[in-house]
Amino acid sequence: MKPIWVVDDDQSIRFVLEKALQREEFQVRCFASPREVLKALQDDAPQVLVSDIRMPGGSGIDLLAEVKRRHPGLPVIIMTAYSDLDSAVSAFQGGAFEYLPKPFDVNKAVELIRRAVEESLREEVADAAQAQAPEMLGQAGAMQDVFRAIGRLSQSNVTVMITGESGTGKELVARALHKHSPRAQGPFVAINTAAIPKDLLESELFGHERGAFTGAQTTRRGRFEQADGGTLFLDEIGDMPFDLQTRLLRVLSDGQFYRVGGHQPLKTNVRVIAATHQNLEERVRQGGFREDLYHRLNVIRLRLPPLRERRDDIPMLTRFFLGKSARELGVEAKRITDSALARLATFDFPGNVRQLENLCHWLTVMAPAQVVEPKDLPPELLGVPTAPAVPAAPADAVAGASPAALPAAAETAPASTASWLAELEREARRRLEAGEPEVWASLTRLFEGGLIHTALDLTRGRRIEAAQRLGIGRNTITRKIQELGLDD
């Protein structure tokens, strides 16, 4: 573990904290000014930084901002006098872990620093686990065919069309094709053509010149320019407006395009990977999709199997998503019994991998015990009749990387509401009887995280709309996403 850094111009404060932390077997390094800390940060970094606010030659708030710029995950504790309440507020706005009012109780100070250390170590473990997490999971024969195809296609610049139901992981496959291709050092740019209004899609793809339309106050680079030298992933290509299909065909043919309002042709070197859950052949027959564009995109087709065709993967995916959800919410991962896994394997999962991930997030929040048994599964998996549920969002899922949604059965009727409130009360009682610290904070974090996950899933990641549905402000949802670590 790295040492604790203490910075304060008061030598007595440094001495007291250093001795108290050393008694607890922490390594400590002391500094007299922010300038010394910034110099030391060029070669090293602490486990936790404890800093005074007011010091000659620099402010603790300024130091906090610079430290967060270099090391965003580093916990910083700000020491402040009671008269510095405004400064304490600024410290929290700047991302401080906590503030320590002076004069402080040494034991309480050490305990606060210990909490910051534990948080830092948890973050390191989570980051390491995330870094080691596999790109894709699957042992079923259908997925092994997909992996082999990715291996063959990754070294080529050929255009690929990925097909499959919503929730099967099409963007994840596109990212894998990019990561293992000669373009891996270039950008990977993704755009969902179904999620952007028709009037804005042309500008999103090709950019626009200043003054091209009302509100175009500056020149903007489009996704084709942003992806130059890399890969452009066009998700839900079947929903692209017909007139834009003509422009897309021109780019795919000769690599040239014009910005909206522009007169100078631009050249781009982009590998295009497209995806759709629709039957494009049928769209062509109906006149909704250009046949020449279809043949241009459909050079190589890669079909992703639905989860019901790879039921053998459900236990492995379930355990993976339970661990992932626990890391996101900062709680201990739930374990699931073989009998519960067997019940899951009988369900068809119309929402595919996305639905399974959402279910695992629901279990992490709502299952009453650490071991998930069949009776803990939501009613729709147990065959219990429920009121009509809110339809799942048709967003194309990224297996392993997307906001999770609580199953709608948790909020359909008063009886169901009473059920989840009872689960919440049981969980609160269990934690309180066990003497767990900060029960309020931990359960509130789980509850808020579940709400925001659900709203973002229903709005396909659109934060402003999610905030409106939840009845909170735009700034509030942005702050909560940052606080809860829900950015993805």
Image: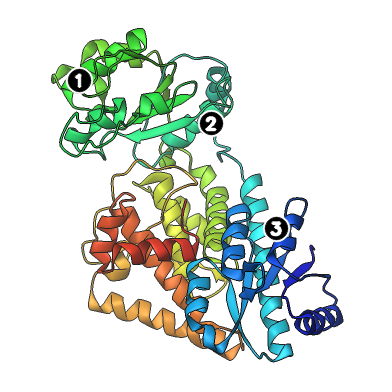
Left or right: 388, with 334 as reference point? left
- Mark 3 Cα within 10 Å, few/some/many (few <14, many 20+)? some
Picture quadrant of residue 324: bottom right
Q: Which amino acid does label 3 sit on?
A: Leu
- Residue where numbered disc 2 is placed: 176
Q: Is residue 378 above or below residue 18?
A: above
Q: Regarding mark 1 in the picture, which secondary structure is present there? A: loop
Q: Regarding mark 2 in the picture, which secondary structure is present there? A: helix
Disc 1 to disc 2: CB gap under 8 Å: no
Q: Regarding mark 3 in the picture, which secondary structure is present there? A: helix
Report x, y in % for residue 343: 46, 57
Distance CA(mark 3)–CA(mark 1)? 58 Å
Q: Which of marks 3 and 2 is in front?
A: 3
- Which residue is at 51% across, 48% downward? 314
Q: Which of 45 and 204 is in front in this view?
A: 45
Query: On the rendered image, what quadrant is the N terminus found in?
Result: bottom right
- Mark 1 Cα within 10 Å, few/some/many (few <14, many 20+)? many
Which mark identifies residue 289?
Answer: 1
- Residue where numbered disc 3 is placed: 38
- Which residue is at 39% across, 83% downward? 422
Picture quadrant of residue 386: bottom left
